Each structure stands twice: as C-alpha cells, then as structure tokens.
Image (cartoon, rainbow, N blue to C red):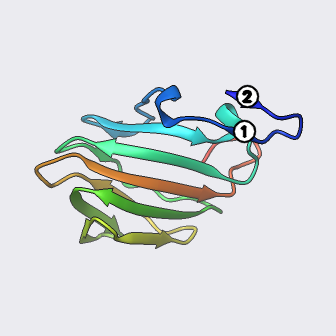
Amino acid sequence: MAIEENGAFIRNIAEVPWREFPDHFGGALSKPLVMPETAGSRRIDYRISMYQPMAHVAPHKHQVQEQIYHVLEGEGLMEIAGKKHVVRKHDFIFLPPGVEHAISNSGLVDLVFLVITSPVTDDGKVL
C-alpha cells in the first residue's frame, strides 16, 4: 500500500486480514478497511463483513454514531429495537444513535455486507 503525504491511499481488499471483533460469534468476520487503526481515520469506520450461516453479532447500540449496513450477498435477520426484519441483497439499513440492533445470518449461504459508521469515538473505538 502506498500512502500519499496527505494520507490518501489505494489499497486492495485482499491486503486486509479478516477479524472477528468482540461480541461477534460463529464466523462473523470483518475486514476493517478504513478505521483509526488501519487508516488513521477520525470520522469514519468502514468495513466489509462476511457472516457464515448462524453467525451473529450480539444486540448493541451506539451512543453517538450513525451506522449504515448495505447487504451485498445472502440473507439474514436484522433486529432493530427488538423487532426482526429479513434483509437480503441490495437492502440497506440506517441506524441512528441509541437504537439497539443486531444482525445474524439465517440463510443458507454467506451473508456479505458493508458497514459504515460515523463518527468514531475520541479513543478510536466504535461504541
């Protein structure tokens, strides 16, 4: 990866290792493409996630962050404030701060989706 003096860069997704973040279970993997620890970003956390069948993240909410999920492949269940919704390819979900949510793969193939979160916290973590 070549980083310009101004911090801009181009990177291939294959260069970024898969991670299972805390409170993600059963093969709920993400590639942290742009976030404080991988790109020095201060206002955005951008990931691609791939959840194997039955993988999920525990219900949680963010204090100040807005979040967007964009489903690229597969299908699953998005739980928003205790109500479950089927999500599939081309669905996108907007979550304002303070709304409890979770996503799980209830389908037969991998669930692949983008997650965009803004802003990140002062310590670089997404709450």
Quarter of the image holding residue 2? top right
Q: Residue at x 57, y 49 (%)?
A: 46
Question: Which residue bears the numbered disc 1?
Answer: 9
Q: Nearer the viewer, residue 114 or 117?
A: 114
Residue, far left: 108
x, y percent for residue 107:
14, 54
Q: Going by the image, does 48 lie left or right of 88?
A: right
The image shows residue 1, relative to residue 51, as above or below, that is above
Confirm whether residue 127 shows in the render: no
Confirm whether residue 41 shows in the render: yes
For the residues marked 1 and 2, what is the alpha-carbon distance in whole angstroms? 6 Å
* Quarter that holds the N terminus: top right
Label 1: state its secondary structure.
strand
Q: Going by the image, does 17 lie left or right of 113?
A: right
Q: Nearer the viewer, residue 47 or 122?
A: 47
Q: How crowded is mark 2: few (under 14 residues within 10 Å), some or many (20 or more)?
A: few
Label 2: state its secondary structure.
strand
Asked if marks 1 and 2 touch (Cβ < 8 Å), the reply is: yes
Q: Which amino acid does label 2 sit on?
A: Ala
Q: What residue type is labelled 1?
A: Phe
Quarter of the image holding residue 96? bottom right
Question: Which residue bears the numbered disc 2?
Answer: 2
Q: Name the N-terminal-most of marks 1 and 2.
A: 2
Q: Going by the image, does 127 lie left or right of 9?
A: left
x, y percent for residue 110:
22, 46
Quarter of the image holding residue 81? bottom left
Q: Which residue is drawn at 24% across and 62% down?
A: 77
x, y percent for residue 59:
37, 55
x, y percent for residue 38:
65, 32
